[in-house]
Amino acid sequence: KAVRSGMGAQFRLQFIYINSLADLASDYPENKFWLTSPRADTSIYSKEFDLAESFLVFGEEGDGIQDFSVGDRVNIPMPGDTESLNVAQAATLFLFEGVRRNLV
């Protein structure tokens, strides 16, 4: 059911397995890294957010990303005291914004 629900998208994605963000950054020095964080100054709706030649890095829903030594932080603006969304929902918003602006 999981494969069927993805409608084949999982077969068009490239997955890279790494030990650390530092390793990934050293392997892809020409790429931009966006690290999701509720405390970021950059919003996914700002002109600075660009997915071209970029990696989107999502952390755990509770603690988020612990290593901010690589890349720039980006957030989804949330009203009130809301801290975060489910990581799958957050990824959906990031990718939709990229598609909406033809950034992918």
Image (tube, rainbow, N blue to C red):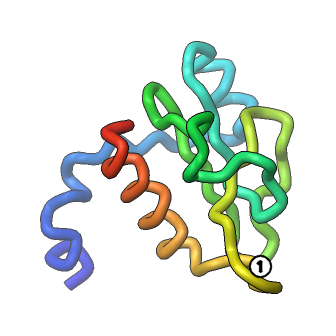
Looking at the picture, tell me which residue is in the foreground, 79 or 15. 79
Residue 61 horizontal/vertical position (percent):
69, 75
Query: What residue is rendered at 79% in x and 53% in y?
Result: 40
For residue 84, side relative to residue 98 (left or right): right
Observer-nearest of 84 and 49: 49
Count of numbered circles in the view: 1
Seen from the viewer's position, the closer of residues 78 and 91 is 78
Quadrant including the N terminus: bottom left
Q: Quadrant of residue 32?
A: top right
Q: Position of residue 20 (x, y in %)?
A: 72, 40
Quadrant holding the C terminus:
top left
Q: Against 54, is 87 above or below?
A: below
Q: Picture quarter containing residue 86?
A: bottom right
Residues packed near mark 1 inside 10 Å, few (<14), some (14 to 19) or many (20 plus): some
Identify the element where label 1 is drawn: loop
Residue at x-position 46% and y-position 65%: 93
Name the spot of residue 41 as percent of width and height, x first: 80, 49
Q: Residue furthest top?
A: 30
- Residue shown at 52%/43% (left/top)? 17
- Asked if residue 87 is positioned above or below residue 95 in the image, the reply reads below
Q: Which residue is mark 1?
A: 83
60 with respect to 45 (left or right): right
Q: Amino acid at mark 1?
A: Glu
Q: Is residue 50 shown above or below 17? A: above
Residue 60, percent from left and from top: 69, 69
At horizontal 22% and vertical 70% (from top left) the residue drawn is 6
Left or right placement of residue 89 versus residue 60 in this view:
left
Q: Is residue 60 above or below residue 45?
A: below
